[in-house]
Image (tube, coloured by chain):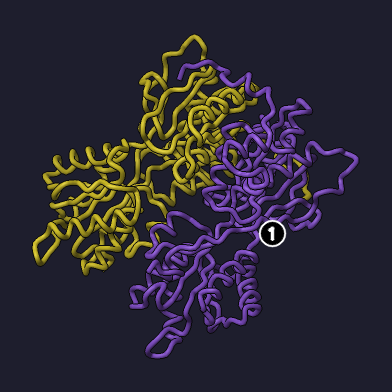
Chain colours: A yellow, B purple
Amino acid sequence: MKRDARPEAGRDARIVRITDVARAAGVSPSTVSKALNGSGSLRESTRERVRDAAERLGFVSDAGARALSMRRTFIVGLLSTDNVGRFSLPVMLGAENALTVGQISTLVATARKGSVQEQHHLRTLVARRVDGIIVTGKATDHREPISVPVPVVYALAPSTDPDDMSVVPDDAAGMRLVVDHLRTLGHRRVAHVGGRPEHRTSQVRLASLRAALDEAGMELVGEPLLGEWSEPWGRQAVDVLLRGGGAERPPMTAVVCASDQLARAVGDRLRERGVRVPHEVAVTGYDNWQVMWEASRPPLTTVDMELETLGRRAAERLLAAITADPENHSTDRGIELVPPRLVVRGSSMADD
Amino acid sequence: MKRDARPEAGRDARIVRITDVARAAGVSPSTVSKALNGSGSLRESTRERVRDAAERLGFVSDAGARALSMRRTFIVGLLSTDNVGRFSLPVMLGAENALTVGQISTLVATARKGSVQEQHHLRTLVARRVDGIIVTGKATDHREPISVPVPVVYALAPSTDPDDMSVVPDDAAGMRLVVDHLRTLGHRRVAHVGGRPEHRTSQVRLASLRAALDEAGMELVGEPLLGEWSEPWGRQAVDVLLRGGGAERPPMTAVVCASDQLARAVGDRLRERGVRVPHEVAVTGYDNWQVMWEASRPPLTTVDMELETLGRRAAERLLAAITADPENHSTDRGIELVPPRLVVRGSSMADD
């Protein structure tokens, strides 16, 4: 496409303020701030509108602005150990969004073959003189810290070193949202279907579910069913649950699943066994994965981990660390939890 | 993780030959070559073993070796316009694999918001002095060429300029593999369910299916059903197809689908309508997407586009262009088709 190479050079010189974004999106400045930080409870359409306006206008966050004011251009490394990409990709995109507005480029390296390949990538990134590195993993299991001479932020999978900077989804809050929703609808007996029992994600979600149910005075029916992160396991789990019921009705009125893939399979199998969703049994998922929630009958109520927001926060913290006063190393350590969002659809609440 | 920073520095100095990879993988050198180029018909397990051995030993392709022999380190830009990532991610990973072995780093930029953002990214990549750019898109629709002063290879979505270098999946070959498989099993009447009619992918797959059926003396039953790339549409299409049949039996013995998502939904709906898969009607997909083929009952026979091979080829061609004799610009233009692979599972052939 032939066009003037720098159509926006003049515009770039002017600083876009939060009030400009607010005006363009038709919202208040505090809503802009909430939308871009992923905090507060906003409608997704509002959040989207603000993000679009911010991107369109080239709005630069505080950290990005500080980077620009130093008149440096940065290169940031992004090390991923995810060979699937479904989780780390939105994190990468969020990071990229946060970084690009400040004229920062991202060198990406994917280590799928274990630590030798990872060491190789890290040496390359350091040799390329990156200003910092974001490490993103495939699960929210803790991971060993990396040893490099530049600032590092761990996204999705936190570092085992509590003094490192990590940004992770708040799964406990996610399960509280689910339980609160079900409690409001009158549910008291809830079953749980989860993925691989050795995964930290499975353990955290189950423990959070137990705590939230206790607090709400609700009951976890039978043993929680942990197995695989797959649809065949989700369907099998339903057969186990229905065997536990009386002759006439299921022993639970809701099934809380640890992923959308499981929830979709649970819904499918309940329907096949003649149990009406959500009228007899409500089903909830986790991930807000469109492929799954859309194909489910009815579409899934689920938890969105806000992974793009998570990636954006990781990038902002990295930029802050890169541009920070070198005398002041103590700030901004530890784990930051990104609040999730409940998306209510037909699998928990009938339209009629 | 603390360890010697350069444990393999000594080993790097020695050139790994194709015969070394062959020995490590327990295959012939020509098998290594086939496996790494994605050509020939090898078992996937063999291909995997060869790739693992090549990666473990740090085998460097011809183009990579030429780059190394010039004692340059390269930075390559990767511009993606895919906001889903399911298709462009394996392409990126394949490119990264090909590039990393030659100590080449990848700057990634994702343009999801149209051409203004894309222009911004391209200016940044050029300002970063990348040696070349791979452009990868979300569909195999043609795209406008980009205008930059470095070599460019288009992966997945070919450039509209036939003089550009593009590497794309060979969908015509994929449909021929499907039809040939069904013909061998004795099928003669085949229906087609596809995605959005305005997508080039839909048109190419349908045209290829028609041509392959003609050649095999087989019949396309009724009108091809193009709609959406979604499961709800796949299920709806089955209801349309069964309406067309007689009172007793479906009008076709096989349904060829343009994606695994559609095939999974077609299989689900056929089962719900009491049609046994594959005994009464065989179903085939396209993509070899594990989430879908694994959840299907029975698992899907499908076409694997070999997207990682495609990414690797794009990277190799880019490296070849970067390191080429500048006097000789005429080589290696035009579209390269990457051969797909048929994966046979239970949705077309019963185990019993």
Quadrant where the N terminus of chain B sits is: top left
In the image, residue B43 lies at what x, y percent? Answer: 55, 53
Residue in the image at 56% along x and 68% along y: B178
Local SS, label 1: loop
Q: Which residue is mark 1?
A: B142
Q: Residue at x 69, y 57 (%)?
A: B337
- Does residue A65 show up? no
- Total numbered labels placed on residues in the image: 1
Establish if B66 lies above or below A242: above
Q: Position of residue B229 (x, y in %)?
A: 50, 64
Residue at image position (37%, 46%) is A304
Left or right, residue A150 beside residue A201: right
Q: Which residue is situated farthest in the top direction here?
A: A327
Q: Residue furthest right?
A: B327
Q: A65 left or right of B69?
A: left
In depth, the one of B201 and B317 nearer the eye is B317
Residue B201 in the image: state x and y as whole percent: 61, 64
What residue do we see at 35% from left, 42% from top? A340
Q: Residues within 10 Å of mark 1 (few under 14, many from 20)?
A: some
Which subunit holds the residue at mark 1?
B
Measured as percent of width and height from the top left, residue A149 is found at 54, 16
Q: Quadrant of the C terminus of chain B?
A: bottom left
Which image quarter: residue A280?
bottom left
Inspect this view and state whether residue A160 appears: yes
Reply above or below: B95 against A105: below
Residue in the foreground of this view, choosing between A130 and B293? B293
Is A312 placed left or right of A57 in the picture? left
What residue type is disc 1 on? Answer: His
